Image (cartoon, rainbow, N blue to C red):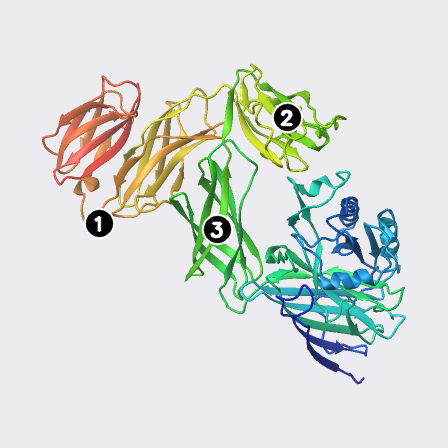
Amino acid sequence: MAHFLLMCIFVAEKSINNLNHSTMKKITLFLLTVLTFTFSLKAQQYVSTEPANRNVILEEFTGRGCGYCTDGHRIANEIMANNPGRVWAINIHAGGYAQTSYPNMITQDGNTIHGGFSISGYPTGVVNRTTGSGIDRGQWNGQANTQMGQTSECNIGGMVVLNPETRVATITVEVYYTGNSTVDQNFLTVAMLQDSILGSQADYGNYNPTQWVGNQYCHMHILRDVISESAWGDPISPTTQGTLITRTYEYIVPESIGSPNGVDVDLNNIFFLAWVAERQQGNAYRPILTGCKLEMVQGVDEPIYPSFKGITQIGGATCTHSKDIEISIQNIGTETLTSMTLVVEMNGESQTINWEGELPQYAVEKIGATVEVPFGTYPVNVTLTEANGEPQQKTSTGSVNCIEWADVEIEGDEEELRVEIMQDKFGNHITWEFTTPDGTVLGSGGPYTMLAAGTGTQMHLEYVTVPADECVKFTIYDQMGNGICCSYGHGYYIVKNSQGDVLFGDEDDGQFGESASHLISVRGPQAQVEVGETQVSNITYTHADFVATMVYEGYPDEVGFSCRKVTSSEPMIIQGFYNEFGNILGFTDDLEMTSIYVVRAYAIVNGETYYGNETTFQTWTEGINELEQSLKVYPNPTSNVLNIEGEGMTNIEVYNTIGQRVMMQQVDGNKAQVNTESLENGLYVVRIHANDGSVLNRTFSVAR
C-alpha cells in the first residue's frame, strides 16, 4: 500500500504592537503532518488513538468589579474538582466589570473571545462553545456533564518544554481523529493561563472564601495569551478518521502582560491548554470537540543543569526556633543527576548538604534542611556548588519566619483559652481561628452580624480548649482589610489564659489591617532532663568511644552523639544507647586520622532535643603511640583491683561519668595496679599518660 506524507510549514509573527502585547515577542513555527492512510509514517508521542468522550473547556467571563463572579469561580472549581483531567476553566477578564487597575488581567485575545458571544450578565460562561450566548453559572455543570457524555471526533495531547533561562517554550501538540468531523476544517487553539495572581475582587456574599488570602483574592486559571495565530485558533485539516496532526510552536513567554498596570508572568505558575473547535468565529454554533492540559517541563540542551525551583518553609507555625525548609531542584539538563552539594546559609550560620541519588531529566527533587531562626523574618540562601562532580555556582534565596510565642504552663492535660472580640459595625467581615501546626482547627468564630447603627461595637466571648504540649496559632481576619477599628466603632481583640492573664491583644489592637496572628505554647509539666559533658576514650586513627551522663526520670526516646570536625559545620550523628546507670554510650569507626573533632551528647525526650556540653579530641597520627599497641586493661569489670600494662606509662587518672577526677597515681615502669575498693559500682574512665606526651582513655566498670 502506498503511503502519502503531506507536510506544510507556516511561519508567522504576531504583531508586537497590539494592545497588551507591547512587551511581547511571539514566534510560531507550525509543523503540520497529515497521515491519510491506515499505516502511519510517524507514530504519535502524546495523544491516544483510542476513541474517547469529549473533555470540556469552560470559558468564564468575569471581572474584578463583579461581586457575584466569585460564585462563578467557586462553581467552576467544583466542576473541575469533581471531574479531574476532564474539565478546565478559563477565567477571561473582559467586559464592563474588568478593571485596568493593578492587576490588569484584560487581554486582546480575551476581548476578542468575549466579543464573539452574546453576553448579558456576569458571571456568565460558555461550555465547549456549544451556545452563541453566555449561559448562567447554574447551567454550567449540567452542560458539562452532557458534553462529557458524548463521543469526541478527536483526541488531543502534547508537551511543553520551557527553558527558564531564555523563557522560550517549545510547545508540541498532537491531534488524532478517531472519527470524522462534520466539517472539512477544524481549528486548533493553544492558550497560556496563569494561577495565583493576588489582587482585589468584589465579593458581595463571600461566595468563594477559599481563594481569599487576607484581604487579597487569589485569581486562578486566568487567560494571559493565546499562542495560536488567531484568538479563534489555527486551521487544521483533513479532519477524517485516522489522521494525525502535529504542530510545534516556539513561544517566548513575556516578562509581563497587560497595559496599563500589567501583571508579571511567573514561570512557576503558568500552564498551557489546547483544544480543537469545529468552527471559527462567525457561526453561532462553533463547538469545541475536546481539549486538554499540556504536560510541561523545564529543560535546556546542556548535559548537567540543575535548576532551583524554590525554597519553601514547610510545616505550620511552631513554637520552636528550629524551622524546616524544602529546597526544590529540577534536573533540566540532558544527563541524570547522581550527586549534588548544597550550602545553606542563614543568619551567619552555614551547613553543607551532600545529596546522592538518581534524578532523571525533568524530574524534581525536594531536599530538606533545618535552620535555627530568631524571632522575625530572615533570608535563607542556598548555593549549589557541585553536581555530578562538576563545579556549580547557582544561588537561590528564600525566606523563613519565626513568630514570637506566648508561653502558658499548666499542671493538667488541657487549657481553656478565653477570646474577647469587640467587633465594630461590620462584624460580618470578622472571622478568627486557632490552628495547630498541621492545620487542624481547634476553634473558630465569626462572622458576626453587621450592626444597624452607623458606628457601634459589640462584645463576643468565646472559649477554646487546647491540649497540653501543643503550639497553636491564633489568627483574626477582616475581609475588607481595614481591621475592626476605628471609623465604624472602636473594636479590638484579647486572648487570655484560664487564670485571666492576657496573652496578647489589648484595647488598641483593632487596627490590624487584613489579619493578625499570634502563637501560644501550652506546656504541661515538663520533663527534667540534663545531659552531661561527653567523655572520649579508646581514641585511635579512626575510632573513639563516647560516654555522657544523663539525669532524667524515665527512658528517653532517642540518645546519641553529634560529632563534627572543627573545620566543618556538618555533624555526624552517632546513634547511642542508654544504660541502667543513666549513661549515654556510643562509638564510631568513621573518623579521619590526624583530625580534631568536637562531640556532644544528645537526648530526645517527648520530641524535644537536649544537648550536653561539647568536648574536643584529636585522632592519632600515623607512626606514634607505642602505648596503644602494648596497652592492656584488665579485668573489666573489676571488683577490687584494675591491672594496667603498657610501654612508657608515666601516670594514671580515673574519672567518673560526670567528669570528676576520683583517683590519680604515678607509674614507675610498664605495669600498674589501681585499687578500686573505694569506688562505687558504675562506669569510669581511666586516662593513661605516656612519656611521649600521648594520652589514652579506656572505660571500665566496677561491679560487686
Instruction: Determine contact: label 1, label 3, CB under 8 Å.
Output: no
Q: Is mark 2 on a helix, strand or loop?
A: loop
Callout 1 amino acid: Glu
**Mark 2 and mark 3: Cα distance apart in space:** 39 Å
Callout 3 amino acid: Thr
Which of 289 and 270 lies nearest the eye of the viewer? Answer: 270
Viewport quadrant of the C terminus? top left
Name the residue carrying label 3: 397
Residue depicted at x 63% and y 67%:
24
**Percent from the top left, x then y, of residue 527?**
46, 21
Which of 372 and 404 lies nearest the eye of the viewer? Answer: 404
Q: Is residue 533 shown left or right of residue 413?
A: left
Numbered badge on residue 491 = 2
| Residue 501 showing in the rendered view | yes
Callout 2 amino acid: Gly
**Percent from the top left, x then y, of residue 695?**
19, 37
**Percent from the top left, x then y, of residue 399?**
50, 45
